[in-house]
Amino acid sequence: MKIIRILLIILLAYLAFIVFTFPASFATTRLNAAKPEVQINDVDGSIWSGGAGDIRYQGIPIGALDWKAQPLGIFQGEWKNHLVLNGIVDGEGELAYGIDGVVNLYNTTLNTTFSEIVGNLHKRIPLQMRDFQGEMQADIAKMAVEPQSKKLIWLEGEFILSKLKMPEGRYLGDFAAEVTTIEKQKFRTVVHSTSDRGLQLQGVITATQQGEIELDIKLANVDLLGERAASMIQRFMKKSDDGYYRFQWQGNVKYLMMLLG
């Protein structure tokens, strides 16, 4: 019996060694084959702790990624990893895959700039926005996505756009948007200017995953947007006594796009 116990201990130790040193390249090779639009290269380490020096999505270089597993997440029904991203977007946070199939992002901070985005996604950025300048930051408390349906079902966080300038050098200002989830797949965003410079903005946007939206937006100093944009704002928005133009809308976003187009 003593020999059997020793053999069991050796077997368990061997299995633990296999699990904890399982090469990440084995998993990423299969992921690359299953999802050809995503390619993970220059992989080092194990599935518990490692990194990838070159991640691409549809041929676009995203950057490098390091990960470290958080095993205690298993007790919450999730496989959780701490991630550090360096590339088009720099960031750090926790990514988890739940037993319900939902992918969750927790306590994550992301940073990038317009020039970084445009430099890497040049052909995917509208022509009129390619020369914009500014800094972008996202502080996400929680974001949940259903991979199969590709639906965003939960979002809590703050998104900041600062030092925004138009191609002509006009300073548009600094803005923040605080997003909360009202119910599954329905979100409320409160937007506002964070400085006295540039365009003055405040409002509330409620949106669903199906494209239904409610808008209540107020703008001031609209001349900064240029003659064409200012003219459109003056056409669709009512000016109040405090100098703000107000726009309210309720319906599907595709009809709003047709209206503005």
Image (spheres, rainbow, N blue to C red):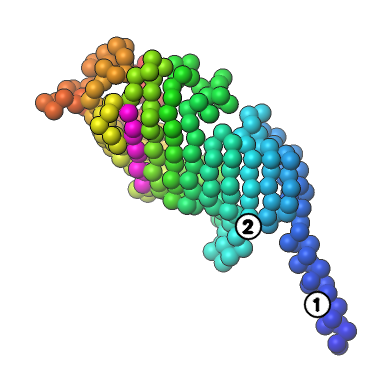
| In the displayed structure image, the side of residue 228 where residue 145 appears, left or right | right
Residue 252, x across and y down, in percent: 36, 30
Name the quadrant of the N terminus. bottom right
Identify residue type, mark 1: Ile
Q: Does the magenta stretch include residue 61?
A: no
Was residue 178 drawn as part of the magenta stretch in this picture?
A: yes
Identify whether 193 is placed above or below 70: above
Residue at 42% from the left image edge and 28% from the top image edge: 134
N-terminal label among 1 and 2 = 1
What secondary structure characterizes most of the magenta part? Answer: strand
Q: How many marks?
A: 2
Q: Nearer the viewer, residue 102 or 167?
A: 167
Magenta stretch in the rendered image: 173-180
Residue at 35% x, 43% y is 178
Residue 192 locus on image (x, y percent) = 29, 36
Q: Quadrant of residue 119?
A: top right
Q: What is the CA distance from the residue labelled 1 to the residue labelled 2?
A: 25 Å
Residue linked to disc 1:
9
Instruction: Determine which of the numbered discs, if any, sits on residue 237 in the image.
Output: none
The residue labelled by disc 2 is 69
- Residue at horizontal 57 percent and vertical 59 percent from the top: 78
Question: Percent x, y for residue 208?
Answer: 39, 39
Residue 150 horizontal side relative to residue 30, left or right: left
168 relative to 41, above or below: above
Location of residue 9 (image quadrant): bottom right
